[in-house]
Each structure stands twice: as structure tokens, then as C-alpha cells.
Image (spheres, rainbow, N blue to C red):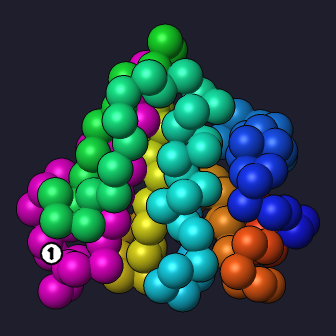
Amino acid sequence: MGYNLKDIAIAAKSVLTEAGTRKVFLFHGEMGAGKTTLIKALCKQLGVDESITSPTFSIVNEYHIPKGKIYHFDFYRLKNQTEAMDMGCEEYFYSGDYCFIEWPEMIPDLLPINCVDISLSVLSNNRREIRIDKK
């Protein structure tokens, strides 16, 4: 599915519909592909009212929504999977709350089953492509 950045809210709504009841999302794409931008739109669709920022340095940000929480992870800076285990990532993944995970490639052995794989590609400055695969 291709989308223009100005239509990102529509794309986010479509992603959530496609995901059904699954709540763990793995975001793949090169630096600058729009992973964080799409996650911000997904958070807005789910009812986040607070400021949404990238957890590049904190590794995880927590947002509150009417029916629970959203955990937004950025594992780009991890040195190894042990760092993710030490922060208790598996407790988040199996909490029943939404988990949006950037750079899941950094923790391949820790990822739960029944995830939604989101692959983002840059088509042009203002256009992206999303591929969705449910495991």
C-alpha cells in the first residue's frame, strides 16, 4: 500500500484495521523511511493526547490511551539482546498492551509470535510504501 505523507492518518487507520487484534508491531525500514512518523500517526489513531517522540536514547517511551498503554521501542542503539532482556522487554511484549518496535532486527531471539511486520520503503520525498505481514 502506498501513501502520501499528508495522508498518513488514513494509512495508520488502515494498518490498525489490517492488524485486527494483534498488538505487537515490528517496524522495518532504512533510516529515514518513516517508521517513527507512522508510529506517531498510529498513536494518534489509538487516542494518545500527549507529545509523541522517538525513544532513540531512552529505548522505550510509554503512552496512555483510553484502553491501556502503548510502548514504543527503538532498539537501534542496543549493543546486544542482553540489554533488551535486562530492561524487561519481554514483560512489555506480553503485557497485552500495544508495542511498536523499531529495529526489531536487533533482538531477533526475543520477539514474540503473532506480530505484525510492517516494512516501509521510500518511494519519493513525500511518498512511502507499507507492506504488512501478519505472523
Label 1: which residue?
A: 82
**69 part of magenta stretch:** yes
Element on which disc 1 rests: helix
- Residue 97 lies, in percent from the top left, at 45, 32
Which residue is depicted at the point 38% across and 42% down? 52
Q: How many marks?
A: 1
Image-based side of 54 in relation to 15, left or right: left
- Residue 66 lies, in percent from the top left, at 49, 12
Image-based side of 75 in relation to 17, left or right: left
- Residue 101 lies, in percent from the top left, at 44, 60
Which residue is depicted at the point 46% across and 32% down? 96
- Residue 95 lies, in percent from the top left, at 38, 34
Q: Name the image quarter holding residue 115.
A: bottom right
Circle 1: residue type: Thr
Q: Can residue 59 be seen in this snapshot?
A: yes
**The magenta stretch spans which residues?**
68-91
**102 part of magenta stretch:** no
Q: Name the image quarter holding residue 126.
A: bottom right
Q: Nearer the viewer, residue 78 or 1?
A: 1
Q: In this view, does 9 lie above or below 129?
A: above
Q: Name the image quarter holding residue 109.
A: bottom left
Which residue is depicted at the point 55% across and 22% down? 47
Quadrant housing the N terminus: bottom right
Classify 10 Å Cα crowding around label 1: few (below 14), some (14-19), many (20 and above).
Answer: few
Which residue is depicted at the point 60% across and 44% down? 41
Q: Which of 62 and 52 is in front in this view?
A: 52
Q: Is residue 135 above or below residue 39?
A: below
Q: Can residue 135 be seen in this snapshot?
A: no
Q: Nearer the viewer, residue 105 or 74?
A: 74
Which residue appears farthest toward the right when viewing the image?
1
Q: Is residue 21 above or below residue 54?
A: above
Q: In this view, does 78 lie above or below 98?
A: below
